[in-house]
Image (spheres, rainbow, N blue to C red):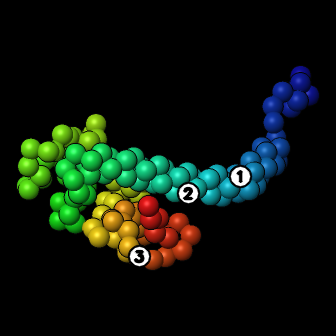
Amino acid sequence: MTNRLRKSGFTLLELLVVLLIIALLAGYVGPRLFGEVDKAKIKAAASQMKTLSDAMDHYRLDVGSYPTTEQGTKALVAKPDGAGNKWQGPYLAKDVPLDPWDHPYVYRKPGKAGKEYDLISLGADGKEGGSGIDADIEY
């Protein structure tokens, strides 16, 4: 009877081996998954900036110019001072989103290098410059 009881369960050593295998797999797979999360956030920021840029273009078609730096992206959801009767917004269904790292997008008019405006996500660190996931994403 004691022989049957011994064979009916797992030994402590067997459980430790299984836990070690699970820990090794998690150590290998975990960093790869987190790397994919960072890539997804970069793609999400680019997608959101494309949507904001399209809304900016609609604003420009109605009003005749892009919002000023002071008016910023808020001009897409609320009529800014000086827009007159030409403003036909809101140009976004919801409020202007934060970037995937919960920082506001940077909007500047005029933009650098002869662009009409700059629309920038400051990346994970929320500061200008950086590399990797901290790099700025410009549209």
Q: Secondary structure at mark 3?
A: loop
Q: Earlier in the sequence, mark 2 or mark 3?
A: 2
Q: Is residue 4 above or below residue 98?
A: above
Q: Amino acid at mark 1?
A: Val
Q: Is residue 23 visible?
A: no
Judge left or right: residue 21 versus residue 50: right
Q: Earlier in the sequence, mark 3 or mark 1?
A: 1
Quadrant in the rendering for residue 110: bottom left
Quarter-of-image position of residue 4: top right
Q: Is residue 110 left or right of residue 12?
A: left
Frontmost of labels 2 and 3 is 3
Circles 3 and 1, Cβ within 8 Å, touching? The answer is no
Residue occupied by mark 2:
38
Residue denoted by label 1: 29
Calculate the distance from the C-alpha at mark 3 to the C-alpha at mark 1: 42 Å
Mark 3 sits on what residue? 113
